[in-house]
């Protein structure tokens, strides 16, 4: 008797699916975590004349591999984003360093002022990129609707330097 061997299973998703398959004499399938054994099982139930035939596979290793792969993919994506953001921030910072050098060696106060204005714009660009990057990571307790256009606009602004350097023209509609 299944319930003698797994008394805790009766109050789980497995027990619910088992009872439904038995009552309605219909084939059923479920994959879930079984806490007492700290394992994931895939269960397939088939109605028979004597009750149910049950095939059980321990899929814990596969589940853990999938989870590890998912974590790895997330880390790789975070690394690519960090690399892009660092590149996008580095370009205006290099401009600022050059503009400050030029401002120090300018022949006139007007020329120096012009270089400082350019430097200020580049610093504002860095600040904008930083704010956009922070916008990618916002933990919220509830779901929020975000228009796709806002995400696309933000991504295009973050990747603007890379797109320009590769002479890629992006048009949105």
Image: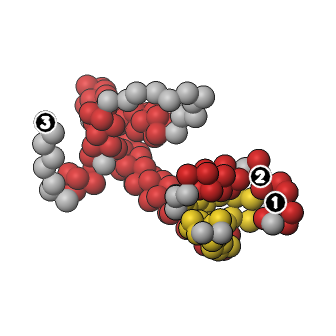
Label placed on residue 10:
2
Q: Secondary structure at mark 1?
A: helix
Q: Which residue is mark 1?
A: 3
**Dot placed on the residue nearer the N-terminal end, 1 or 2:** 1
Is residue 123 visible from the viewing direction of this image?
no
Q: CA distance from mark 3 to mark 1?
A: 60 Å
Residue shown at 77%/56% (left/top)? Answer: 9
**Dot placed on the residue nearer the N-terminal end, 2 or 3:** 2
Residue shown at 60%/69% (left/top)? Answer: 49
Residue shown at 57%/65% (left/top)? Answer: 47
**Dot placed on the residue nearer the N-terminal end, 3 or 1:** 1
Report the side of 46 relative to 115 (left or right).
Answer: right
Q: Within 10 Å of the Cα at label 1, are there few (<14), some (14-19), or many (20+) other Cα atoms?
A: few
Residue 121's quadrant in the figure? top left
Q: Residue furthest front?
A: 49
Q: Secondary structure at mark 2?
A: helix
Q: Which residue is mark 3?
A: 173
């Amino acid at each position: 008797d299944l319930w003698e061997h797994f008394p805790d299973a009766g109050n789980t998703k497995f027990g619910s699916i088992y009872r439904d398959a038995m009552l309605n004499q219909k084939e059923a399938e479920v994959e879930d975590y079984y806490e007492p054994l700290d394992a994931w099982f895939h269960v397939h139930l088939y109605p028979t004349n004597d009750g149910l035939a049950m095939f059980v596979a321990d899929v814990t290793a596969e589940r853990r591999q999938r989870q590890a792969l998912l974590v790895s993919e997330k880390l790789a994506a975070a690394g690519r984003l960090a690399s892009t953001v660092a590149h996008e921030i580095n370009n205006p910072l290099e401009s600022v360093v050059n503009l400050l050098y030029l401002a120090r060696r300018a022949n006139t106060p007007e020329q120096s002022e012009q270089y400082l204005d350019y430097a200020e714009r580049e610093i504002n660009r860095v600040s904008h990129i930083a704010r956009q990057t922070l916008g990618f990571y916002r933990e919220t307790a509830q779901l929020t609707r975000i228009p796709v256009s806002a995400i696309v606009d933000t991504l295009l602004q973050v990747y603007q330097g890379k797109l320009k350097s590769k002479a890629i023209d992006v048009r949105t509609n």
